[in-house]
């Protein structure tokens, strides 16, 4: 999968909620009620990431989960990162609504 140009990434980010371009990756901080909900979100990510064969870099800080998406083989953001970001946004809504 080919690396997207900065313009392509910025266009894709317009359709996503609160994702930001940082260097060669897109990043979002998800906020949840508590640590248990943050951990639940991580367990929900695993099957989705496995199905795409694409795995995020994740940092957890009590009720916050920071996700970094990049395609290491391509050295930047690809359509696969955008697809995973869309799916993560959908998953997070099930925990925050």
Image (cartoon, rainbow, N blue to C red):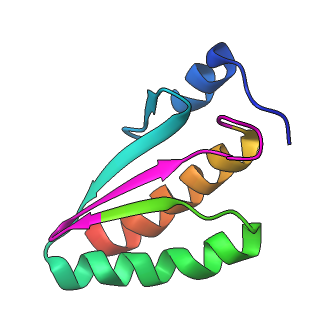
For the C terminus, the image quarter is bottom left
Residue 73, magenta (yes or no) = yes
Side of 78 relative to 9 (left or right): right
Q: Residue 15, can we see it?
A: no
Q: Residue 87, can we see it?
A: yes
Is residue 51 placed above or below 9 in the rendered structure? Answer: below
| Whole-percent x, y for residue 82 in the image | 64, 44
Residue 78, magenta (yes or no) = no
| Whole-percent x, y for residue 25 in the image | 53, 37
Side of 42 relative to 60 (left or right): right
- Which residue sits at x=39%, y=73%? 94
Which stretch is magenta?
60-77
- Which residue sits at x=76%, y=39%? 74
For the N terminus, the image quarter is top right
Is residue 11 placed above or below 72 in the rendered structure? Answer: above
Is residue 47 placed above or below 82 in the rendered structure? Answer: below
Taking depth in this image into account, of 72 and 79 the one nearest to the observer is 72
Is residue 11 placed above or below 83 in the rendered structure? Answer: above
Quadrant of the image occupied by residue 40:
bottom left
Side of 60 relative to 77 (left or right): left
- Which residue sits at x=61%, y=30%? 12
| Whole-percent x, y for residue 69 in the image | 54, 48
Side of 93 relative to 86 (left or right): left
Quadrant of the image occupied by residue 76:
top right
């Amino acid at each position: 999968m080919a690396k997207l140009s900065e313009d392509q990434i910025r266009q894709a980010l317009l359709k996503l909620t609160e994702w930001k371009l940082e260097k060669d990756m897109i990043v979002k901080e998800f906020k949840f009620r508590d640590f248990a909900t943050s951990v639940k979100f991580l367990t929900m990510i695993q099957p989705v990431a496995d199905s795409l064969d694409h795995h995020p870099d994740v940092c957890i800080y009590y009720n916050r989960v920071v996700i970094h998406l990049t395609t290491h083989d391509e050295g930047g953001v690809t359509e696969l990162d955008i697809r995973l970001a869309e799916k993560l946004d959908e998953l997070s809504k099930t925990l925050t609504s």
